[in-house]
């Protein structure tokens, strides 16, 4: 990805008439949970509160964690999950999943939470009309880690993903581990061999194999497919996705079985029209009451992912698929048809030559808004933006906060309605018209336009002409001629 060294941060585009107006919360790098209005005013900071991710609930409550496990001994483990009030007071806390005794640290209970969680009352953690998360009671679904030994998968210790449900008092009342369902995941023999040799071992903690790397888990909630008798979509069932294996799946809460799955192979007759989903994040069912309800919304990162037969891109069978741009996909889970998408083409870039201009190979998310717009977190660039169904950019914000690695990454952002934050007066919404970057200059820089001009006689141009690599539309035209 190519980026300028100088660029504006904060809100850069805002059309109040077409955007779905509210507050946006995200984890500002090495700063805390930050709440902004549509013009980018930082209306509240919960300093130091970590977020994997942060979520804001009705009444101005924020969820996150207070600390992480020392990476010498763990990988992406948050020690707890907490709910704090507007003033930062902890009003709920969960940490009693595993008792950890790391060298040089006091022994303590930890949640080992990572990537996602959901509170009873709301299936997905963002605003859904009539489905508010509970703030003073209810169960919480939490994505967590557990180290396990599974010789049938690999002789190397696995950093396994578990999904647990805890009650308000912090008791674990349900637990599901993905390693228990290895044979349900659909890996072919080449993939199994690659996982056995190296289940994505990492240079952190116990160097265990982060073999699946599940990064989202949410409840289906009421939906039209269950209403017509499809038991796979029971409202209590859980949809999750694993970036390292390119798998999206639904677990039956009652039987623990995987009852619906997309991936890991996208070359089948049923899925080849979708193309390869690679390294995806935040796959979830659009809740009832929102436009597109019942479809699965996915931030298809691209980048690299998957296990299988070695190829020139992957000599060891790890990360066998690669794509250097991202996509947002909205897929009907029954027909597998793409109902809506946002790709570099819809963003207005030449594909595939400039497709990298919409690209986050890790983190990121997508939220369906009540007016049909989609809020997208292009996380690697710290860019949060909102587009209409017709692909019009109506809001854009660039995080100004960077971490020690010079990255302004944003894991996931959420938009909430103003009424969820009664502590604040309604903000003034001021339109921000996009600037013409061709004429934007810093102080001291010369304006565009030659001081003197001469005409060269006999010059001819036909516009863009042919490029070194065929564009997607050129490829389509060629295929059309050959039929």
Image: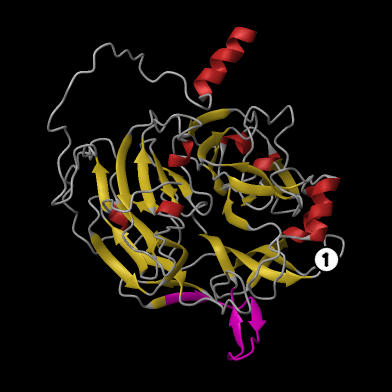
Point 49% across, 77% down: residue:
67
Quadrant in which residue 20 is drawn: top left
Q: Which residues are magenta?
A: 91-111
Q: Viewer-proximal residue, 447 or 272?
A: 447
Front residue of this view, candidates 105 and 314: 314
Q: Disc 1 designates what residue? A: 150
- Count of numbered labels shown in the rendering: 1
* Residue displayed at 68% across by 29% down: 272
Magenta stretch encompasses residue 92: yes
Residue 188 location in percent, x, y? 82, 44
Q: Pick the quarter of the image with the C terminus.
A: top right
Please determine whether, in this image, residue 125 is positioned above or below residue 220: below
Horizontal side of 156 relative to 391 (left or right) equals: right
Is residue 221 covered in magenta? no
Q: Is residue 474 above or below residue 469?
A: above
Residue 449: x and y, percent? 16, 33
Q: Secondary structure at mark 1?
A: loop
């Amino acid at each position: 990805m190519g980026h300028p060294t100088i660029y504006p941060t904060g809100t850069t585009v805002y059309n109040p008439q077409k955007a779905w107006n509210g507050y946006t919360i995200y984890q500002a790098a090495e700063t805390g949970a930050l709440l902004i209005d549509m013009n980018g005013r930082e209306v509240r900071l919960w300093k130091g509160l970590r977020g994997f991710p942060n979520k804001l609930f009705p009444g101005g409550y924020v969820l996150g964690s207070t600390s992480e496990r020392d990476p010498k001994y763990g990988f992406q483990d948050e020690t707890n999950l907490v709910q704090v009030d507007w003033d930062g007071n902890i009003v709920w806390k969960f940490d009693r999943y595993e008792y950890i005794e790391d060298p040089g640290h006091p022994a303590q209970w930890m949640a080992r939470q990572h990537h996602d969680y959901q509170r009873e009352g709301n299936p997905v953690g963002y605003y859904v009309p009539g489905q508010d998360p509970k703030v003073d009671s209810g169960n919480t679904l939490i994505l967590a880690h557990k180290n396990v030994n599974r010789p049938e998968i690999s002789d190397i210790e696995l950093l396994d993903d578990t999904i647990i449900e805890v009650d308000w008092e912090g008791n674990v009342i349900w637990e599901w581990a993905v390693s228990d369902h290895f044979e349900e995941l659909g890996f072919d023999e080449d993939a199994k061999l690659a996982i056995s040799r190296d289940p994505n071992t990492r240079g952190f903690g116990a160097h265990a194999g982060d073999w699946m790397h599940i990064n989202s888990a949410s409840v289906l909630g009421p939906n039209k497919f269950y209403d017509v008798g499809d038991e796979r979509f029971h409202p209590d069932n859980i949809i999750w996705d694993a970036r390292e294996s390119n798998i999206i799946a639904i677990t039956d809460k009652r039987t623990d079985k995987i009852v619906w799955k997309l991936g890991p192979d996208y070359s089948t007759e049923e899925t080849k029209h979708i193309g390869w989903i690679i390294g995806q994040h935040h796959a979830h069912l659009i809740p009832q009451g929102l436009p597109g309800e019942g479809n699965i919304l996915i931030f298809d990162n691209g980048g690299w992912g998957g296990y299988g037969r070695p190829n020139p891109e992957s000599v060891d069978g790890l990360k066998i698929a690669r794509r250097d741009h991202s996509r947002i996909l909205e897929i009907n889970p029954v027909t597998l048809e793409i109902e809506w998408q946002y790709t570099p083409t819809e963003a207005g870039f030449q594909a595939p030559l400039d497709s990298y201009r919409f690209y986050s190979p890790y983190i990121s998310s997508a939220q369906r808004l009540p007016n049909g717009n989609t809020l997208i977190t292009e996380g690697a660039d710290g860019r949060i933006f909102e587009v209409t169904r017709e692909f019009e950019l109506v809001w854009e914000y660039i995080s100004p906060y960077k971490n020690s690695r010079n990255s302004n990454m944003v894991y996931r952002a959420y938009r909430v309605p103003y009424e969820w934050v009664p502590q604040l007066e309604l903000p003034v919404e001021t339109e921000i018209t996009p600037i013409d970057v061709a004429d934007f200059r810093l102080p001291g820089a010369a304006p565009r336009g030659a001081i003197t001009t001469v005409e060269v006689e006999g010059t001819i141009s036909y516009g863009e002409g042919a490029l070194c690599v065929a564009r997607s539309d050129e490829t389509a035209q060629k295929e059309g001629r050959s039929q």
